[in-house]
Image (cartoon, helix red, strand yellow):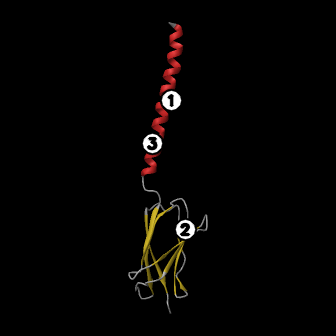
Amino acid sequence: MNHHRSVIKPAAFITLFLLALCITVNAASDKKEKPVGRLLFGKVLDGGDNPLSDAVVYVTNTRTRAVKTYIVGKDGAYRFPALSSAVDYEVYAQFNNHKSDTKSVSQFDDRPQVYMVLKIDTH
């Protein structure tokens, strides 16, 4: 009988190990299903708070220097969904050779949605 106990213990240990591994894998896959990243959105306005249609918004990933652009519509609105929350971004708008101030979105800002107004003095 002593011999059977030594066979059962490793089998039980392996079963528990595999069970723990399955639980860990399931927990990791649950995290991946949550929305990753954040939404940056806002408006581009002139000095009189009027929307600047056809302005171009530039978002630069400060780690990779990759740039995304968005041409705003008549309402001046722009949106950049699914930006990484682990990276800092620089944001500015340009219209007819005029440029807004450059603003930052920090990785330490934990808001899932960041609203930002970019003003361009067109005079």
How far apart are labels 2 and 3 at the CA level? 30 Å
Mark 1 or mark 2, whichever is nearer to me = 1
Q: From the top left corner, tell me how far across and down residue 16 is, in percent.
A: 48, 27
Query: Residue at the location (48% across, 22% down)?
Result: 12
Which mark, residue 17?
1
Residue carrying label 2: 89
Residue carrying label 3: 27
Disc 1: CA contacts within 10 A as few (<14), some (14-19) or many (>=20): few
Q: Amino acid at mark 1?
A: Phe
Q: From the top left corner, tell me how far across and down residue 92 is, in percent.
A: 53, 77
Q: Is residue 6 above or below residue 16?
A: above
Disc 3: CA contacts within 10 A as few (<14), some (14-19) or many (>=20): few
First-in-chain label (2 vs 3): 3
Disc 3, SS:
helix
Q: Amino acid at mark 3?
A: Ala
As drawn, the residue found furthest toward the right would be 64
